[in-house]
Structure formats: structure tokens, C-alpha cells
Image (spheres, rainbow, N blue to C red):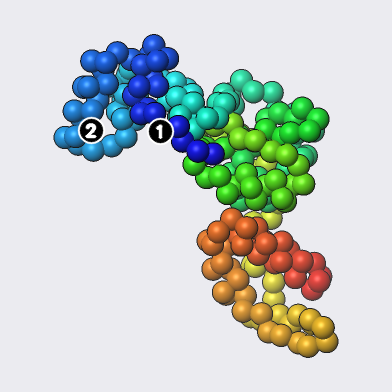
Amino acid sequence: MILTGQPLGQILKEMELVSEFDIQEALQVQKEKGGAIGRILVEKGLISEKDLTSAIGRQAGMDSVDLETATITSELIDMVPVNIAETYQVVPVEFDGSTLTLALSDPQNISVLDDLKFMLNLEVKGALADRDQLEKTLEAHYAGKSESMESIIGSMKGDDFEIVDDGREKMMDMEQLEKDVNAAPVVKLLNMVLLTAIKDRGS
């Protein structure tokens, strides 16, 4: 996704949510204290969180979605495995038969949609959602559906595991693999899958 380059304050003004005077006051606060202009306007009570999400979405050329009112079916949830949803912090909100719409909270992270298009083997597009709403929705629909990285590692016995690859045995550093959970999303997800496979192999 590419930001339009249009200032957020101007977008909010075009949406008839704030006046030029409001924008200038917010810019003065930003100059004196720092902070994002959208957040300043929310804190001043001039716009709502929903207004801010909608404006940021418009700035990024994205639709926005209100997860508090969205109808998220079990069929939609089944289209995105829990490990992918939690790793990438996305929630499926609509499928029109060819394109899956995913709610996310970062409009500038284009690599997320590129990764998911490949991993889900579907055309995908993003819709901007409030971060708090997204976290609550993930918790409501995906909580308890999979084991965490820590629980998988905790259930293992021994410090090292042997993996046979083309007839050659290699020792896997489990501590390093656990650390890699904080790496890029693709690495994090692959490590989760790998750890799960190792656990299944040893059971």
C-alpha cells in the first residue's frame, strides 16, 4: 500500500470532521509537545478513534472496517489458520469468492499482504482496523486454538533434538529457534510450524 502523501489533517478536514483552526491548534501542540496529529485531535475530543482509523485508511488508499459491528463467520475464520492470524495480526472479514479481505492495523506494512497472498494461495486485500479492536477480535475468535511457542518448547524433553536430513544427522539448537520467534513474521511462523512438527515427531 502506498500512502497518498496528503496530510492527515487535510483528509480530516475534507471529511468535515475538523476545521482549519482545529488543525492549526493541533499542529501547534505537535510542535510544542510532539506526537501524531491524529492522536492529538483524538485526545482533544475533536475526532473519535473510528474517525482516525477511517482517515488513515483513506490516506493509505485502503478501506476501513469497524470490527465491533463486522460479521465474522466461522467460515471466514477457517480460511486463515490461527498461527497465521496471530503472527501477522490479521482477521478475515469478507470473502467475495475470489478475494479475501483482511483487517489489519498497520496500513504501511505491505509485506504482510504479499506474504499472506502466497501463504493462503488467495488474492487478498487489506482493510484498516483499530488496533485495540483487532486485538480483541483475535482473542475472541482465535484464543485457545493453538499451542504457543512456549508451551510447545516446555513440553519437550532434553536440550537438543536430532533431525535426519538426507541421511545426515544434525543437532538443532532449540534455544536459538526459540529466540527466532521474535524475527520477521515469516521466520516466526515457520519456526512455530517446525517446532510443532518436532514435537509431533517425538510423541
Residue 152 in sight: no
**Left or right of residue 122: residue 105:** left
Q: Position of residue 172 (x, y in %)?
A: 66, 80
Q: Which residue occupies the extreme left position in the image?
A: 32
**Left or right of residue 135: residue 42:** left
Q: Position of residue 25 (x, y in %)?
A: 21, 22
Q: Quadrant of residue 125?
A: top right
Q: Amino acid at mark 2?
A: Gln
Q: Nearer the viewer, mark 1 or mark 2?
A: 1
**Left or right of residue 46: residue 202:** right
Task: Judge whether 132 appears above or below 164 on screen.
Answer: above
Q: Residue at x 61, y 35 (%)?
A: 126
Q: Residue at x 49, y 41 (%)?
A: 108
Q: Residue at x 72, y 34 (%)?
A: 100
Task: Judge whether 49 appears above or below 182 on screen.
Answer: above
Tell which of 123 and 26 is nearer to you. Answer: 123
Q: Position of residue 53 (x, y in %)?
A: 47, 27
Q: Residue at x 18, y 28 (%)?
A: 28
The circle drawn on residue 30 is: 2
Q: Of helix, strand and loop, which one carries label 2?
A: helix
Q: Are marks 1 and 2 in contact (CB under 8 Å)?
A: no
